[in-house]
Image: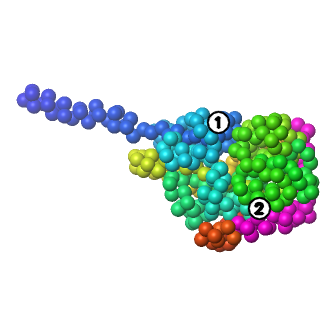
Amino acid sequence: MTNRRTILAAGLAAPALLRPQAARAQELTLRLHHFLPAISNVHRFFLQPWAAKLAADSNNRLRVQIFPSMQLGGAPPQLYDQARDGVVDIVWTLPGYSPGRFPSIEAFELPFVAHKRASVNVQAVQTFYERRMRAEFSETHLITAWGHDAGVIHAKREVRRQEDMVGLKLRFPSRQAGEALRALGAAPIGLPVPQVPEALAQGVIDGAVVPWEVVPSIRLHEALRFHTEFEGSPTFYIATFILAMNKAKYEAMAPDLRAILDANSGMEAARMAARPWDEEGPKVEEMVRRRGNQIISLSPEETARFRRTTEPVITNWVAAMRERNINGGALLEEARALVAQFGQGVA
């Protein structure tokens, strides 16, 4: 009897002894790689809160370790492939760093298509992804896609009229923004944003088009004194972004942890992404103004001139898409409709 009880007790105890080990097996830490420093607004006000939300929702079983400033190696244009190939688990990057590779999302990067508020663009781009772009990003598991707020021209000289653009060497984030600058007479130069400070110091560029949000992280307000804004919507340009995850890593997740990630993906994550631009961007603008830099708002008449001059960029893009058997006109129409839908009542 004693031996039987001993064996039975040992059998009942075995699962209990295994439970901590099983629980540990369900824990997961994902490595997220991106190109901006840890002081950047996107890092502090989107990526970190998003990671904290995953940890809180999973009782700290699903964690995201963030590596800013390309700490895991490579260059910003390589980030998407790092996620695809499993070099890292998740990346934050711009589709525009791979020109022509993700053609559909370019509809939002065309001149005077997107809204001036990120809160509108994040919803429009994410909805557009769900309807139109899954195939283009099928090499990874896309967590969310979004777009920022109105881009600003930051330059060494004043830009008040279209003529002031002529000859300005300006950094651009996506090929459509570059084409718009070219149409306006500027000399567009494509660079990942971390390279902007060195390019300015060496005279490679005279300025850059970036949103207010990123200005402090690359100290643009210290290198340049003139900043030109576009009033109203649609705005001159935006860039789009993605959080992309290695597909095999996603599919191998424990079902409950995958469900938590899914609940913090898509539109939920896109709306979180609006904060660095809509909430922190105005604070940056005010800081730059207090510093004594000159902030210029283009008049409605001059903005209309910019828009007319850049219309061929849209025409050429639609034609280029047609050559790739893509209905660019339909994509553009839907992008504009989504901006109008989510922009109702947004000033």
- In the structure shown, which secondary structural element does the residue marked by tag 1 occupy? loop
Q: Magenta stretch?
A: 290-318
Residue 233 percent across, percent down from the top left? 79, 62
Query: Residue 243 versus residue 194: which sits nearer the camera?
Result: 194
Q: Is residue 260 magenta?
A: no
Rendered residue at 24%/33% (across/down) = 14
Residue bearing the label numbered 1:
69
Residue bearing the label numbered 2:
111
Secondary structure mostly taken by the magenta-highlighted segment of the chain: helix
Q: How is the image coloured?
A: rainbow
The quadrant of the image that shows the C terminus is bottom right
**15 left or right of 112?**
left
Q: Is residue 126 visible?
A: no
* 64 is higher (above) or lower (below) than 251: above
Q: Amino acid at mark 1?
A: Ser
**324 left or right of 162?**
left
Q: Is residue 80 visible?
A: yes
Rendered residue at 89%/54% (across/down) = 166
Rendered residue at 81%/36% (across/down) = 202
Q: Is residue 293 magenta?
A: yes
**130 left or right of 108?**
left
Quadrant position of residue 90: top right
* 99 is higher (above) or lower (below) than 77: below
Rendered residue at 50%/54% (across/down) = 139
